[in-house]
């Protein structure tokens, strides 16, 4: 919102010397943001004065142009020229060459004298041109930076001015004024007006505010005016699209009269160009009061005005010259001929005010915010009117705004107002808010006094009634955003001053902070990063083939997945059931850009539909659904467990002198998975696995001690790698993190570290090749008893000395007692007990 300072001073006590920066500094105190300063004098400097053309000689030139050699008086006759400078004639008459032809002798014009600077850093000086010394320039509107008209120079009589020769033209045209531009948040639509900003400036400075609405003498009631019917048979959320419509008639208007320069100047600084007097008056009142309005050519209307929803297939030609197909939800202003405007957004071309208009019907209405916002977005028609309506306009203001437009049409356009008028609609019910006496202080952290609370609320325009336990507050009609006690508390804090809120760090109540699951996730992702992997985030949208490949272990078993109704692309039309497809895409992208050695991981949700999904209908917007409706919505949401996956390809380190990097292999993927379990204190049971996305012989299945499978790790399938242009022997792992989180103990207790020495013994067992090493290891652990501290497989051998169909597994066993030093016999006895269990279960023979 741009606020011309001269306009603001009419309703707020802005110091005479205050700049736009000063005004913005005050408005920042009450919650507005600074945007920009608009000051014509930043690019325009005098001397620029009113001159009168004494003579005009047309001189054809050899290039085909005809120039005017003019003598222009810039000082009243008989007076001395008090301006000095190179090129300024002391006689008060300047010789000027001008190429425009839209003026004659005797016209008063704007003259930029030598020494002046025009927008674009164009310096005016006396210079020889077309055989004359031209000392100045007769300016056009565009040259002055106040419009786009460059067809001819600005003749002051055509804009209704007859000033004295030598008058400062910058002051005459309002070019010494300046505007402060602020950002208005969506909940404060009342500030899209000089009225609203002036009130806020008064709040910020503690000075008096004069309501511009109080200066308008609007009739208490209207009747006998133009026929208007409110007929909304399809209200949105049960709220009528229009609940008040005021119509006033002004006859005998001269629409060709020029708009006064003071109004043009204010509109220009506010960011609106001058169009015609009736339109300018309409825009001026909208900016001043915040109530959009519209002027119709009364003689072009046919029958009563009806406010209704559009019919299927209906069209309208809007003021921008475009024919628009209407939606049945659009709220229209209509007459017997059809649609004459999209309510609150843009008027129709068929009833547009033109130079031939003599009778005007003024509309000032109150429209529903949702109806206007939807129509504006639907037709891509942002306008100053819709900007205000969709944020909320004061219901009480329609009659005042209509009267203000009428008064200006009478004063400036020579019209005569009809005493009769139209005012139809029903006022909304007044809402009251109960504010407990201590609520604001407890919420904000300041001990507000009773006087501060009542003064702040009354300054807002609210009616405040003291009750036994606090206050009963009726919000002003222009503050529809004030609905709860929290809203009132925030307003009290804003007006008392944000700078008065103490900067004290509150003490966190016990039991708050990160949840157990959040803490677990943080530990895991940090551990993987500390291990040298790089975290990435990928899109959750994948193809059906990716879900069928990565989402299920068995080949050919399709994975049930959620299909998107409006996917980014048909190729990625499903929500993921595995994180690995996104990691592969990230790796491919990096590989294509020359990064050959990668170790990536991601912690993200997957989407696993099971049973009923969604609900039969979607709850209506604009109102909070009932608890049972919310329960139904949540019941229809698919399970979304957290998965953690890692992918590695290339080498574990860059090549260097004396160092040969090691390629990533299946063991690295398995170590990454085990790291997740170790961080959470959960033992992952590793066994030979089978998954269609992994190599048939180099994949491990990962399970909990309960037997629940929680993931896979190993080398990805060669065919899959080739299909995705990935390096051979790329490895990966994926775990159901939520399942591991649930299995983790609430508190991880560290094991006691014995101070006694360890006794290490090795054993090599020959077993059938189809016996998993992990099963043999489990048998050894079980048989060794409590003295066994650790057992690990360190070698697998098949070849000479081992009969066909068998393999040799070498294990290292570490024994330790907590209360003594073990003897060699004790360690050997425990080892033999372990071997006995392996021999009983698998026919293991010591090698």
Image: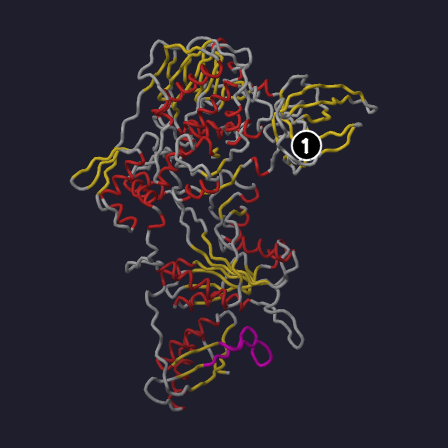
Say what secondary structure mark 1 lies in: loop
Q: How is the image coloured?
A: secondary structure
Residue 809 covered by magenta stretch:
yes
Extent of the magenta region: 793-812
Residue on which disc 1 sits: 88
Q: In the image, residue 792 lies at what x, y percent?
A: 47, 77
The total of numbered circles placed on residues is 1
Front one among 653 and 621: 621
Q: Examine the rendering and report whether any part of residue 315 can be seen.
A: no
Q: Give the residue at x 44% y 74%.
A: 777
Q: Which residue is drawn at the image coordinates 42% and 80% (left, top)?
A: 835
Would residue 53 be found to the left or right of residue 444 on screen? right
In the displayed structure, 512 sits above or below 291; it is below
**Image side of residue 44 versus residue 196, left or right:** right
Foreground pick, 429 / 295: 295
Q: Quadrant of residue 493?
A: top left
Give how far across and how far down residue 321 sits, in percent: 57, 20
In the rendering, at what x and y percent does residue 523 appear? 42, 64
Query: Could you say which is closer to the camera, residue 808 or residue 315?
Result: 315
Q: Residue at x 56, y 63 (%)?
A: 599
Vertical arrangement, residue 106 with respect to residue 754, above or below: above
Residue 758 against residue 560 in the figure, above or below: below
Q: Evaluate whether residue 342 shows in this view.
A: yes
Residue 438 in picture, x, y percent from top left:
22, 46
Residue at the extreme left of the image, as rendered? 468
- The single residue placed furthest to the right in the displayed view is 62
- The structure residue drawn at horizontal position 69% and vertical position 27%, both measured from the top left corner, is 94
Q: Circle 1: is it few (<14), some (14-19), or many (20+) Cα within 10 Å?
A: many
**Magenta-highlighted stretch: main secondary structure?**
strand
The verdict on residue 332 being magenta is: no
């Amino acid at each position: 919102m741009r606020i011309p300072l001269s306009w603001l001073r009419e309703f707020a006590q802005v110091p005479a010397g205050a700049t736009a920066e000063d005004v913005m500094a005050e408005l920042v105190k009450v919650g507005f943001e600074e945007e920009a300063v608009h000051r014509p004098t930043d690019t325009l400097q005098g001397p620029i004065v009113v001159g009168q053309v004494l003579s005009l000689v047309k001189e054809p030139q050899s290039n085909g142009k005809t120039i005017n050699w003019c003598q222009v008086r810039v000082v009243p006759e008989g007076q001395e020229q008090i301006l000095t400078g190179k090129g300024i004639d002391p006689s008060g008459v300047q010789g000027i060459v001008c190429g425009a032809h839209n003026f004659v002798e005797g016209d008063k014009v704007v003259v930029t004298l030598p020494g002046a600077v025009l927008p674009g850093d164009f310096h005016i000086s006396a210079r020889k041109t077309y055989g004359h010394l031209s000392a100045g320039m007769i300016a056009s509107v565009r040259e002055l930076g106040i419009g786009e008209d460059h067809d001819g120079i600005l003749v002051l009589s055509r804009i209704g001015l007859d000033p004295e020769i030598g008058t400062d033209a910058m002051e005459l045209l309002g070019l010494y004024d300046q505007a402060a531009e602020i950002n208005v948040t969506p909940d404060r639509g009342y500030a899209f007006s000089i009225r609203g900003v002036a009130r806020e400036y008064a709040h910020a400075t503690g000075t008096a505010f004069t309501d511009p609405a109080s200066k308008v003498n609007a009739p208490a009631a209207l009747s006998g005016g133009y026929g208007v019917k409110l007929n909304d048979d399809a209200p949105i959320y049960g709220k009528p699209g229009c609940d008040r419509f005021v119509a006033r008639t002004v006859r005998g208007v001269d629409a060709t009269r020029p708009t006064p320069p003071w109004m043009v100047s204010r509109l220009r600084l506010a960011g609106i160009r001058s169009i015609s007097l009736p339109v300018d008056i309409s825009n001026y009142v909208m900016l001043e009061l915040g109530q959009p309005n519209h002027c119709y050519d009364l003689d072009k209307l046919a029958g009563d005005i009806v406010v209704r929803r559009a019919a299927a297939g209906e069209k309208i030609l809007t003021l921008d010259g475009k024919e628009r197909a209407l939606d049945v939800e659009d709220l229209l202003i209509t007459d017997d001929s059809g649609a004459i405007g999209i309510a609150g957004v843009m008027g129709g071309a068929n009833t547009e005010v033109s130079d031939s208009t003599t009778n005007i019907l003024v509309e000032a209405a109150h429209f529903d915010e949702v109806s206007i916002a939807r129509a504006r977005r639907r037709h891509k028609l942002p306008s100053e009117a819709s900007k205000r309506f969709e944020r909320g306009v004061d219901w009480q203001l329609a009659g005042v705004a209509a009267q203000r437009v009428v008064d200006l049409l009478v004063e400036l356009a020579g019209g005569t107002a009809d005493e009769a008028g139209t005012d139809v609609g029903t006022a909304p019910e007044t809402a009251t808010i109960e504010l407990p006496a201590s609520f604001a202080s407890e919420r904000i952290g300041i001990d507000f006094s009773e006087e501060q609370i009542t003064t702040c609320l009354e300054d807002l325009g609210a009616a405040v009634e003291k009750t036994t336990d606090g206050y009963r507050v009726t919000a002003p009609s222009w503050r529809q955003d004030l609905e709860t006690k929290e809203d009132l508390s925030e307003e009290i804090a804003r007006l008392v001053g944000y700078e008065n809120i103490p900067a004290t760090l509150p003490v966190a109540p016990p039991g708050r902070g990160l949840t157990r699951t959040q803490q677990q996730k943080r530990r895991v992702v940090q551990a993987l990063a500390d291990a040298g992997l790089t975290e990435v985030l990928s899109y959750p949208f994948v193809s059906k083939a990716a879900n069928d490949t990565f989402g299920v272990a068995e080949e050919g078993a399709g994975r049930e997945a959620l299909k998107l109704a409006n996917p980014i692309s048909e190729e990625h039309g499903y929500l993921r059931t595995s994180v690995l497809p996104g990691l592969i895409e990230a790796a491919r992208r990096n590989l294509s850009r020359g990064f050959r050695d990668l170790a990536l991981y991601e912690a993200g949700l997957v989407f696993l539909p099971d049973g009923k999904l969604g609900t039969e209908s979607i709850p209506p917007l604009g109102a909070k659904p009932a608890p049972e409706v919310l329960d139904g919505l949540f019941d229809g949401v698919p399970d979304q467990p957290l998965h953690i996956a890692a992918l590695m390809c290339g080498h574990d380190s860059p090549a260097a002198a004396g160092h040969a990097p090691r390629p990533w292999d299946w063991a690295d993927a398995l170590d990454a998975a085990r790291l997740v379990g170790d961080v959470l204190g959960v033992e992952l049971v590793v066994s030979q696995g089978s998954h269609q996305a992994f190599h048939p012989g180099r994949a491990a299945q990962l399970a909990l001690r309960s037997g629940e499978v929680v993931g896979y790790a190993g080398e990805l399938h060669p065919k899959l790698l080739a299909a995705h242009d990935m390096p051979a022997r790329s490895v990966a792992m994926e775990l159901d993190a939520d399942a591991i989180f649930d299995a983790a103990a609430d508190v991880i207790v560290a094991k006691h570290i014995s101070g006694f020495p360890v006794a290490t013994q090795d054993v090599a067992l020959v077993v059938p090749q189809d016996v998993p090493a992990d099963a043999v290891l489990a048998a050894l652990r079980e048989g060794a008893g409590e003295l066994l501290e650790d057992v690990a497989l360190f070698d697998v051998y098949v070849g000479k000395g081992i009969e066909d169909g068998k393999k040799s597994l070498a294990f290292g066993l570490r024994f330790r007692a907590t209360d003594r030093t073990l003897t060699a016999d004790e360690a050997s006895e425990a080892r033999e007990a372990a071997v006995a269990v392996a021999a009983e279960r698998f026919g293991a023979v010591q090698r």
